[in-house]
Image: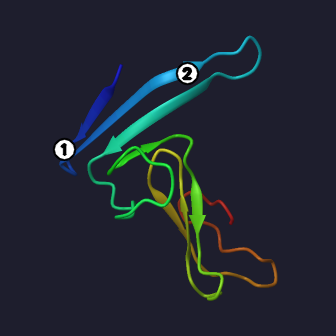
Amino acid sequence: MARYTAHSMLASLNIEDTPIGYTPPRGPAINFTVTYNQRDTQQPQTFSYSNLGPKWTFNWLSYVTDDPNNASANALVFVPGGGAETYSGFDSGSQSYLPDPQSHAVL
């Protein structure tokens, strides 16, 4: 059953639903969760990947965008469930970016 949350400070609506899932006899459960975020600004106008429509995302979708021709350009990691992390400061010696300020993950 779908659940909704309203963020009054952002005047925003979020809807989350898990329409399908599987619990195997051994191992972790596998769920397919879809999320609608009224204020999601990270999605492109034209999708070049699997999608459920504007402002919808799902927990199996994650990808990286970068500009391989420009080492000083930022890289974006679009995370499952919506949103993105921005990585900057590419170091050609270690072939990695500076840690993300919020998650501290290194790309």
Q: Earlier in the sequence, mark 1 or mark 2?
A: 1
Q: Which residue is mark 2?
A: 21
The dot on residue 86 is none
Of badges 1 and 2, the one in the foreground is 2
3 relative position to 103: left or right = left
Residue pictured at 39% horizontal, 28% vertical: 17
Tell me: residue 41, above or below residue 97.
Answer: above
Find residue 8 and name its label. 1
The image shows residue 58, relative to residue 96, as above or below, that is above
The quadrant in which the N terminus is found is top left
Element under disc 2:
strand
User: Going 33% across and 50% down the picture, which residue do you hit?
Assistant: 55
Tell me what residue is drawn at x 57 percent, y 41 percent. 60
User: Distance between the Cα atoms at labels 1 and 2?
Assistant: 31 Å
Three-letter residue code for mark 2: Gly
- Image height check: is 77 above or below 20? below
Identity of the residue drawn at 33% across and 42% down: 36
Q: In this view, which residue lies farthest toward the top? A: 25
Residue 77: x and y, percent?
56, 62
Tell me where residue 23 sits by quadrant: top right
The secondary element bearing badge 1 is classed as: loop
Which x, y percent locates residue 64?
59, 64
Q: Amino acid at mark 1?
A: Ser
Where residue 16 sits: x, y (%)?
37, 33
x, y percentage for residue 7? Answer: 24, 43
From the viewer's perspective, is 50 left or right of 30?
left
